[in-house]
């Protein structure tokens, strides 16, 4: 009896091991295609994902896709970007139409468990707020009782607004849109009293889309937690690890002062941690199944987290967003990467 139980246990272990051996199918498909397919937001979000007249995508979320491509291929530009609406995005990922989402998706329990997907990190800590015309004379979200509010359907924003107004014993009229462009247009054309979404989206919308940005204000209340990050299909641990650690590499590089401008000089550093991060001391690439110079390539071609933040949404961009919660943990923020070792 004991022998049969032992044999069964060994058999199950072999099954599980076999399953793990097959766990690289997503990564294998990406490599065979020689292109990473990255899902971004329809209409874009200024500073996070926007496309120019030449079809070139830029932004913080785009930089995550580029970092993953750099780690896998040694080339940050082997990415195809697929715009998806809030309602399309998770279905498209489930169906294999994209390899990952990097489009300001909020990490929630049900999304992480019920959809067959995995959130692998937090690119940007955000929270939902409201933007209103200054002429409305409103200074606080608690003055929005009875207001009409433009919001994207299929987003966490719908539920957050309902919870906030119910908690504060207020009413509102939701004006729902699937297309961000339609939602923004409706707000600026006066169809809604307020426009609601993640605060980063509000600031980007005010700068990029308002007829006169100074005519609009973002109210001070933040009514939710919105941890935004990349999402992959459940099942391929190796691909998920590469996406996760590509982002962590950008954060770790900033912590150690490794930038796109000095990374070549940093290769000569005597610091054992920096040598390990940049692949001078081998081993970390093998652990992920990529080249040992994967972090070097990411930083050289994409930059560290701070560089990406600054040029896309921070002081080096039109948005001028403060680092705030997205500062490094060493500077009072929440961005913290496990060690590359």
Image (cartoon, grey):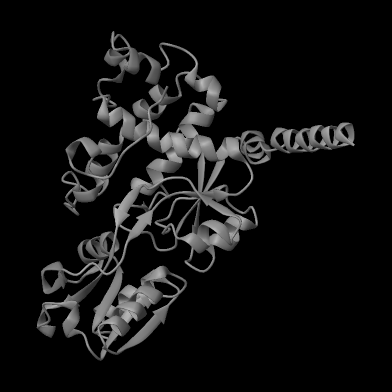
Left or right of 308, for residue 13: right
| Outermost residue to the front | 1
Name the side, left or right, on which 221 lies relative to 68: left
| Residue found at x 32% / y 35% | 251
Instruction: Please state, as top left, top right, bottom left or bottom right, where the N terminus lies in the image.
Output: top right
Q: Is residue 64 left or right of residue 242?
A: left
Indicate the position of residue 316 as horizontal and vertical percent values: 18, 43
Residue 302 visible? The answer is: no
Q: Nearer the viewer, residue 45 or 340?
A: 340
130 left or right of 92? left
| Residue 146 location, quadrant | bottom left
Quick check: 53 above or below 300? below
Q: Residue at x 37, y 71 (%)?
A: 157
Q: From the top left corner, tell me how far across and down residue 45 is, in percent.
A: 34, 59
- Residues 298 and 171: in front is 171
Find residue 115 and report its image quarter.
bottom right
Q: Quadrant of the C terminus?
A: top left
- Establish if 115 lies above or below 62: below
Identify the residue at horizontal 51%, vertical 63% (top origin): 110
- Counting from the top left corner in percent of width and height, residue 71 is at 48, 30
Q: What's the residue at 25%, 24% (across, down)?
A: 261
Classify 181 as above or below 78: below
Number of numbered markers? 0
Residue 125 visible within the image: yes
- Image coords of residue 204 (percent x, y): 25, 60
Please name whichever residue, 293 or 274, is drawn nearer the observer in this view of the structure.
Answer: 274
């Amino acid at each position: 009896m004991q022998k049969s139980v032992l044999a069964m246990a060994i058999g199950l272990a072999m099954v599980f091991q076999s399953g793990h051996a097959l766990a690289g199918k997503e990564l294998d498909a990406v490599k065979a295609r020689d292109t990473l397919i990255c899902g971004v937001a329809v209409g874009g979000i200024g500073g996070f994902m926007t496309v120019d007249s030449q079809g070139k995508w830029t932004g913080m979320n785009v930089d995550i896709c580029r970092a993953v491509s750099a780690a896998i291929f040694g080339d940050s530009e082997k990415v195809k970007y697929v715009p998806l609406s809030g309602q399309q995005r998770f279905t498209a990922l489930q169906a294999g139409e994209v390899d990952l989402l990097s489009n300001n998706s909020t990490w929630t329990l049900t999304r992480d468990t019920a959809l067959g997907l995995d959130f692998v990190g937090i690119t940007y800590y955000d929270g939902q707020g409201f933007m209103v015309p200054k002429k409305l004379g409103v200074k606080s979200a608690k003055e929005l009782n009875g207001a009409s509010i433009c919001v994207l359907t299929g987003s966490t924003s719908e539920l957050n607004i309902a919870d906030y107004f119910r908690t504060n014993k207020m009413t509102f009229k939701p004006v729902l849109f699937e297309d961000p462009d339609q939602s923004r247009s409706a707000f600026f054309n006066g169809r809604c009293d307020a426009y609601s979404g993640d605060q980063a989206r509000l600031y980007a919308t005010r700068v990029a889309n308002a007829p006169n940005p100074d005519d609009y204000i973002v109210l001070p209340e933040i009514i939710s937690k919105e941890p935004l990050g990349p999402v992959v299909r459940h099942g391929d641990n190796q691909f998920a690890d590469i996406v996760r650690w590509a982002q962590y590499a950008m954060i770790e590089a900033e912590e150690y002062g490794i930038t796109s401008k000095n990374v070549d000089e940093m290769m000569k550093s005597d610091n054992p941690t920096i040598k390990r991060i940049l692949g001078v001391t081998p081993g970390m690439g093998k652990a992920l199944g990529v080249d040992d110079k994967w972090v070097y390539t990411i930083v050289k071609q994409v930059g560290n987290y701070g560089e990406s933040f600054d040029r896309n949404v921070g002081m080096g961009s039109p948005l001028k967003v403060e680092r705030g919660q997205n500062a490094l943990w060493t500077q009072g923020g929440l961005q913290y990467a496990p060690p590359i070792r």
